[in-house]
């Protein structure tokens, strides 16, 4: 009897920990709750490990990812898979066998807040295999350096170096790439890197080959406003909570983590911060850049007086290499045709929607692919054993767009 009672108590406690009220309309809420419970659990264990001086929280999380998700490079009859380097940066290559020659190519940057993950994760491996096979293409998934050992602009420099190599004649000849049919892509923080690279290389007149397309999957593109409509609507929706995104930004920019409350209060972008001028503010004015159905009844948080000198403590907040949404119209106009995937239940939804609108206004052809039942990270759950229906649908549509436009 006592054993049964103890088991019942533990079951109730587990259910209490897993259950999280979710907005109506989110795809397969119980799957999302279970994924969130695992992530929250590991985050809290990481916090304890860091507080005790055992290791940095991120190191523990990456150890778990490596143990649970990392797989070897294994080829199949349809796709040759190998680990190597691209521009001096570690990468996993996926080469479709047979088919046309030369082949289309995609360079891909994984997500993880610039601190977590690897191209060797099962979810990214399976996704890139599917892309290579269905597109009859060469896909190169980049293992850029990670925080906290590497901070901005290290990750950006890795992404840029790999992309320059990807566009080179030498790599094209070695892998049989069609230099007129190349795409730069990534999800979340990887989408940030892809957008920044597209801007930098779009303006480089010395290049002999350019990207034909950029494909950005729920990209994170700015850190000046943590009260956009989507940040307000989805602040407590897994798997990316608003405080977690602020933490990742500070980690990426090499800033003091104690600044997180100030960022979450928008004190760093207060009107009295002299480093942030009207032009920069207009480039992330969601009241002007978002359609009415996304703004809903939310109102912007405008802080008159913030923490003195706060923006100066994190100067990279205004660096377009870190925050591509802040780029000038002229820089956006030189970037290639774009695909921007966004999810309704994602704090980063409005980053992607605003960027898509700014690209359109700059004259770039844009396909905006929005998922009303989607959540952040859903593409990583497009395969068994943890398969999300919206993730499966989003991945299929993403590959279909590449097939039609690359």
Image (tube, grey):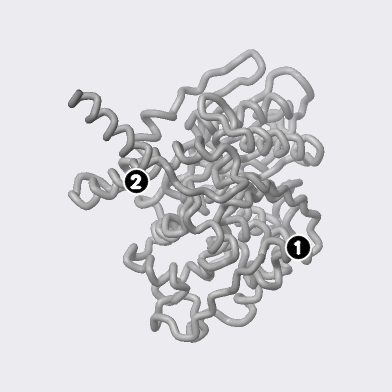
Q: Along the line of sight, which residue is nearer the eye, 141 or 201?
A: 141
Give the SS element for disc 2. Answer: helix
Q: Position of residue 159 (x, y in %)?
A: 55, 48
Q: Is residue 215 left or right of residue 337?
A: left
* Vertical order, 40 against 71 (above or below): below
Q: Position of residue 24 (x, y in %)?
A: 59, 48
Can residue 192 be seen from the camera position used here? Answer: no
Q: Is residue 261 left or right of residue 157?
A: left
Q: Along the line of sight, which residue is nearer the eye, 168 or 310?
A: 310
Q: At 65% from the left edge and 69% from the top edge, which residue is drawn?
A: 286
Q: At 54% from the left edge and 63% from the top edge, which residue is drawn?
A: 232
Pointer 2 residue = 43
Q: Position of residue 207 (x, y in %)?
A: 70, 51
Residue at the outermost top position: 77
Pointer 1 residue = 333
Q: Are marks 2 and 1 in contact (CB under 8 Å)?
A: no
Residue at the outermost front position: 1
* Vertical order, 116 against 322 (above or below): above
Can residue 48 be seen from the camera position used here? Answer: yes
The total number of labels drawn is 2
Residue 305 occupies which quadrant of the picture? Answer: bottom left
Q: At 34% from the left edge and 62% from the top edge, which residue is drawn?
A: 257
Q: Which mark is residue 69?
A: none
């Amino acid at each position: 009897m006592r054993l049964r009672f103890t088991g019942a108590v533990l079951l109730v406690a587990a259910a209490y920990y897993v259950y999280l009220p979710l907005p109506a309309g989110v795809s397969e809420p119980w799957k999302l709750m279970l994924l969130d419970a695992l992530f929250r659990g590991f985050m809290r264990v990481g916090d304890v490990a860091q507080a005790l001086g055992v290791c940095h929280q991120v190191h523990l999380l990456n150890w778990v990812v490596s143990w649970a998700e990392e797989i070897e490079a294994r080829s199949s009859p349809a796709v040759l898979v190998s680990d190597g380097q691209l521009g001096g940066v570690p990468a996993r290559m996926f080469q479709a066998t047979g088919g046309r020659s030369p082949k289309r190519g995609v360079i891909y940057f994984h997500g993880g807040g610039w601190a977590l993950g690897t191209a060797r994760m099962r979810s990214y491996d399976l996704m890139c295999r599917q892309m290579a096979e269905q597109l009859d293409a060469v896909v190169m998934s980049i293992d850029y350096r990670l925080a906290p050992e590497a901070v901005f602009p290290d990750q950006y420099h890795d992404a840029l170096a790999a992309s320059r190599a990807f566009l080179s004649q030498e790599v094209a000849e070695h892998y049989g790439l069609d230099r007129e049919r190349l795409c730069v892509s990534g999800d979340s923080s990887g989408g940030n890197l892809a957008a920044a690279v597209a801007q930098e290389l779009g303006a480089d007149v010395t290049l002999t080959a350019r990207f034909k397309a950029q494909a950005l999957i729920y990209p994170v593109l700015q850190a000046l406003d943590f009260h956009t409509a989507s940040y307000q609507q989805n602040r407590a929706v897994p798997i990316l909570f608003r405080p977690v995104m602020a933490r990742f930004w500070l980690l990426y920019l090499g800033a003091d983590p104690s600044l997180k409350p100030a960022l979450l209060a928008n004190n760093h972008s207060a009107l009295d911060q002299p480093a942030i001028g009207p032009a920069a503010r207009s480039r992330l004015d969601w009241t002007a850049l978002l359609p009415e159905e996304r703004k809903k009844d939310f109102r912007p948080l405008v802080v008159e007086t913030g923490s003195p000198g706060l923006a100066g403590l994190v100067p990279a907040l205004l660096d377009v290499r870190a925050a591509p949404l802040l780029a000038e119209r002229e820089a956006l106009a030189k970037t290639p045709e774009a695909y921007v995937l966004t999810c309704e239940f994602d704090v980063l939804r409005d980053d992607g929607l605003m960027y898509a609108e700014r690209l359109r206004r700059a004259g770039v052809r844009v396909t905006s692919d929005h998922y009303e039942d989607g959540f952040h990270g859903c593409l990583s759950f497009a395969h068994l054993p943890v398969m999300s229906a919206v993730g499966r649908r989003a991945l299929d549509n993403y590959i279909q767009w590449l097939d039609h436009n690359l």
